[in-house]
Amino acid sequence: MPRRSVPLLVSAALTLAVSAVAVSTWPASPALAAGPSPFDFPGRGATVPFAEQEAVAGASNGTSTGTSRFYGQLSSEASGREAVTLDAAGEYVEFTLTQPANAVTFRYSIPDSPSGTGRDASLDVRANGTLVKSVPVTSKYSWYYGGYPFSNNPGDGSPHHFYDEARTLFGTTYAAGTKIRLQVSSTAQSPSFTIDVADFENVPAPIGKPSGAIDVVADYGADPTGARDSTAQFQAAVNASSGRVVYVPQGNYTLYSHVIVDRVTLAGAGPWYTVLGGRHPTQRNLAAGIYGKYVSEGGPSQNVTVRDLAVIGDIRERVDADQVNAFGGAMSNSVIDNVWMQHTKVGAWMDGPMDRFTIRNSRILDQTADGVNFHIGVTNSSVTNTFVRNTGDDGLAMWAENVPNVGNSFTRNTVVAPILANNIVSYGGRDITISDNVVSDTVTNGGGLHVANRYPGVNGPTAVAGTWTLARNTLLRAGNSDYNWQFGVGAIWFDALNGPITGAAITITDTDILDSSYAALHWIEGQSSGITLSNINIQGAGTYALQVQAPSQVTFNNVRASGIAQPNPIHNCVGSGFQITRTGTNTGWYTDTPYCGPWPAPQWGNTTTPPTTPPTTPPVSGNLALNRPVTATGQADVYAPGNAVDGNANTYWESPNNAWPQSLTVDLGAARSVSRIMLKLPPAAAWATRTQTLSVLGSSDGSSFSTVKSSAGYTFNPSSGNTATVSFTATTQRYLRLTFTGNTGWPAGQVSEFEVYTS
């Protein structure tokens, strides 16, 4: 989102030296309490394919950056607010693998060049002491200066956005217990290297070409070496697809402009193998991206699937007018699945009107602006099971500018360290769901979750309306100071600047607000009503439990708070304009005499024990497999396994023909008690009655499976909805697998919906 164009007001004490990483010059704060990582909350957030380790928890002969949450400090942008600096040859951070891995992605910072154009260096990766490879690192995609929209000129002061990420395949798989070091071989190229986290994973082999697919290299001459522009070849393949998959083999492809997609599946060999990138050498507002057709161009595009590839761009600045995003335009009835987005302006800036668009099972890293923005009339669309880190603005956003956004959802995502603004936000919108997410480490000018009538075009019919559900979210070290307002922003906050938030039912339930940087809950600008908070757990807040700067009417039911820094838990200067209704058991946050006075300095580390998700938080209900990660032993043409968990009975997975047995496996994200599976096929009468023979297996780790339900035949009859139910004794499993051995209607396994229930 564009930010307020108020002059940047930041103390000179925040300025970091450009030639070297500086030590914090802020007065010492109490030590931060040892706290969890964003991945310590089973059943919430994205299910990721990697195991993350913090540098500060590894073995190292480097130096801690110290802990800080003040904007402009290197540690304030780190996961957990602390990292490790290596500034001499031979210094290292060493991690011990907790599971087999053949790849690592590490988050790092090196100092910028004096000119602000960036510096290049390398960092060694060693396994049990042996050099694996030297990995290039750079500051070209980090280090911004001045006020919004920011510059690359160090003379503008106020540096920020310090971190970037690098990834590499090891070339072999190392066993659990292997010692992996990130080590400095020389400081000639960079005086220091700061390491934040390392994400270790076991990347599967490249995905082969689907049967009957168009090959952009073999059939249309695209260049997998990246030596020349392949935009025309990609576009020609897409235009000629006529329902066939367009396959992009392993390679690094240069695109000088957008590929416009419509009614096509664009599939790669996997996001570690198929990489799209590039930027026009002279027209710098043209860059690699996959775009639907705008409404003004006859759009939206329809029935687009993009899967199993990466878009890693070359965007080093923020120019809001430039369409240099990984995805854009308008796509209806479309899916982005297992895509890596990095170094673009926005991962996906989608301009509607458009309907039923989903991003799932993806990674969005190191953007100059938002991670995702649903903008202008986006309806019934979602982002789910996606990991977002180090965005230059909002992590996940919806912006109903002039045209209503309706029925959208952000579910089961993990959003870490947005450098500016919020982890997750909806500016206006009707019937919005934000659930089962984990957000952490907000840096400045925003909170963890934000509900707002703000920004142009958000008022009247586009304002907050209908039923809003914010459920089962965890907010960790969320909220921070706003450098324009010069006071803190809450972990969850409401803003009615453009018009009152009235006529909406906003329910926030079963939510954990842990170690907030300033207030846990915050109301500012305008007036709001219809807000109910139920079963809320607040553990630790740097200032207040409630920060009230606008009149509101709020119901509090079973809201419990502890570790509030200020002795008076409520800051309220609007008096009786803030109307509280209390039901159930409420502790630790209420007073009859709120404080109204100067803003106190935040105090962090107020929890006596590391924050934890309380056992009273109820489990997720409904279809536990919806939009969860799913894999299969194979697929026919466009009938990918993701179709079986997308909530749309008209799309389906189909295995290769005559290749029994075939399996479909869903990862529920955490161990769940399950006792019923509902299987569906498309409801169309064209599907003749058939019986499929299958068994159900379960696993806690995804590798060792046991039988949950023995093999049996299940009949699917279109006259009764083409559904079949598999019931079994309740069992606790994280992974469920369907293994097919027969089908009387087609020589393959077929499922349009694989639904899993607790009862």
Image (spheres, grey):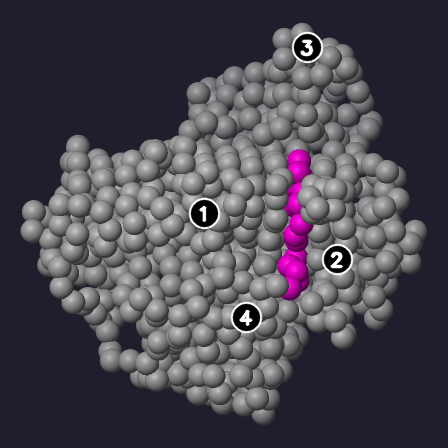
Secondary element at tag 2:
strand
Query: Residue at label 1?
Result: 458
Query: Residue at label 4?
Result: 164
Local crowd size for mark 3, using a 10 Å CA cut-off: few (<14), some (14–19), many (≥20)? some
Provide the residue span drawn in magenta. 322-336
Please report whichever mark, 4 or 1, sits nearer to the chain's N-terminal start.
4
The image quarter containing residue 133 is bottom right
**Residue situated in front as seen by the camera: 680 or 674:** 680
Please report whichever mark, 4 or 3, sits nearer to the chain's N-terminal start.
4
Local crowd size for mark 4, using a 10 Å CA cut-off: few (<14), some (14–19), many (≥20)? many
Kind of residue sitting beneath label 2: His
Residue 164: x %, y % from top left: 54, 70
Judged left or right of residue 710, residue 473 is left
Q: Label 4 vs label 3: CA separation?
A: 53 Å
Residue 673: x %, y % from top left: 43, 29
- Whether residue 329 is visible here, answered yes or no, is yes
